[in-house]
Image (cartoon, rainbow, N blue to C red):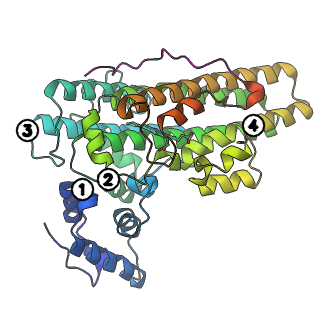
Amino acid sequence: MTTPTTIDRPQAAFPYDDVLATVQQVGKHFMPADLLDHLATVRAQLYLDAEPDPVLGRWLDCLLDKYDHRYDYRSYLALPMLPLPRAGGDPGRRRDELLLWLLTDLIQFELDTAAGQDTVLPGRRPSAALADKRIRLARRALAGPARRVLNVADTDDLGAGPDVATAAASWFTEEQLRGLRLSMLPVATVHDEWMFIRVLQSYETVFTDLALSLRTAIGHLDALAGDLAAGQLHAAADTLDEAAPLFSLLATMQPESFHEFRTYTTGASAIQSDAAKAVESLCATPSAQRLNSPAYQSVPTIRGLVLAGQRTVNLALTEALAAGLPAVTAAAVRRGMDAFSASLTRWRATHYKLAKRMLGEQRTGTGYTEGVPYLDRMRREPVFGPQAARPEPDDELTWSGESH
Ligand code: HEM
């Protein structure tokens, strides 16, 4: 293991590759204490630099989360390192580009391991059949982005060659690409954690884009452009449905692998995902009870927005109707809401089934809820509030990764 020795001008010569290799070789939870002390010193000196490295401080914050005792979902997934979709520009295109990068990185990792290359995370490597299945499902998950961005109809070879890597050089800045490469910070050395992290990062990408779509829909309703709002809601439903193969992909995780690295992820739960709670709270204002529960206490930024009176699709439609939106257009908006509601309810049902399969019925989550029973209750909540209650979610919903 190499300990960096460049404290004087850390930004100019910081040995990113060496430090990243160390994290991936031993796991973030097991980093040597002297290296962590050293990195903390490097971080403390960053403010002295005249031209601070825009990536290093962010990365060291992710890397030193356990050292700082502020480890959470955001730092576990290194979310500050991802060029997530943003308002302005083309969030849908950015979502696709990022999904392509994340999932082809996963495919490459599986291919390299299967080819016997000296990859990191040696624990509990999957059988050849399971690795094949995982690669197939990852390619299925990126079929939509590949079609739209690369004009590729057949994803069979994606991830095996330089295609996405070459194209990505024109999608992302050099700094963003560096951030992406640095965004894999597993806590342990179990092979499947690579996939777990890339799938969660992919869903964060999708939910960030969905939140932007819902905000745009609210803007259209405020402008009494109901047809555009309906279009946004249908597009959001399609985006979430298209991401469903990510769950099939995650279902190839070996439960014993999950339990092994999960020992070291306590404190990081997707209950802390701002993007997922943004989506929920932009549909309808959460009840006071939910707002004061761990569900929203885990996302203080989103909770603050709700308390400050964040507008919702529900409210915007009511106000648009009062302002003269024609009933026929409102009906089109409601159909868009129905489509999104059905899609999110399907997502919740699949999430519940996957969690149950990985954890069993009674095991608690890492986010201070009672775990699986909590998810079972939440999946029955109407997406757009009680007045827009939907039928019971489909208990028989399956995903294709049922067996391995
Ligand atoms: C092995 C797979 C997974 C398991 C076992 C699992 C388990 C759980 C559990 C037990 C909770 C309840 C909160 C807690 O106490 O931690 C939860 C919440 C949550 N999970 Fe997962 N999860 C998995 C995968 C995913 C994936 C892929 C996503 C995609 C983003 C996700 C998103 C969420 C979200 C947004 C919540 C918060 C729900 C709420 O507060 O209503 N989970 N998960």
Q: Residue at x 23, y 79 (%)?
A: 6
Residue 90 visible somewhere in the drawing: no
Asked if the residue at tag 2 contacts the one at tag 1, i.e. Cβ–Cβ closer than 8 Å, the answer is yes
Q: Nearer the viewer, mark 1 or mark 4?
A: 1
**Mark 3 neighbour density, 10 Å: few (under 14) some (14–19) many (20 or more):** few
Q: Residue at x 62, y 18 (%)?
A: 392
Q: Which residue is mark 4?
A: 220
**Mark 1 neighbour density, 10 Å: few (under 14) some (14–19) many (20 or more):** many
Q: Is residue 297 highlighted in magenta?
A: no
Q: Which residue is mark 2?
A: 264
What amino acid is labelled 4 in the image? His
Nearer to us in this view, 183 or 357: 357
Image side of residue 346 versus residue 13, left or right? right
Asked if the residue at tag 1 contacts the one at tag 3, i.e. Cβ–Cβ closer than 8 Å, the answer is no
Q: Which residue is mark 3?
A: 116
Q: Nearer the viewer, mark 4 or mark 3?
A: 3
Q: Nearer the viewer, mark 3 or mark 2?
A: 2
Distance between mark 3 and mark 2 Cα atoms: 27 Å
Q: Is mark 4 within 8 Å of ligand 1?
A: no
Mark sitting earlier along the chain (4/3): 3
Residue sitting at the far top = 396
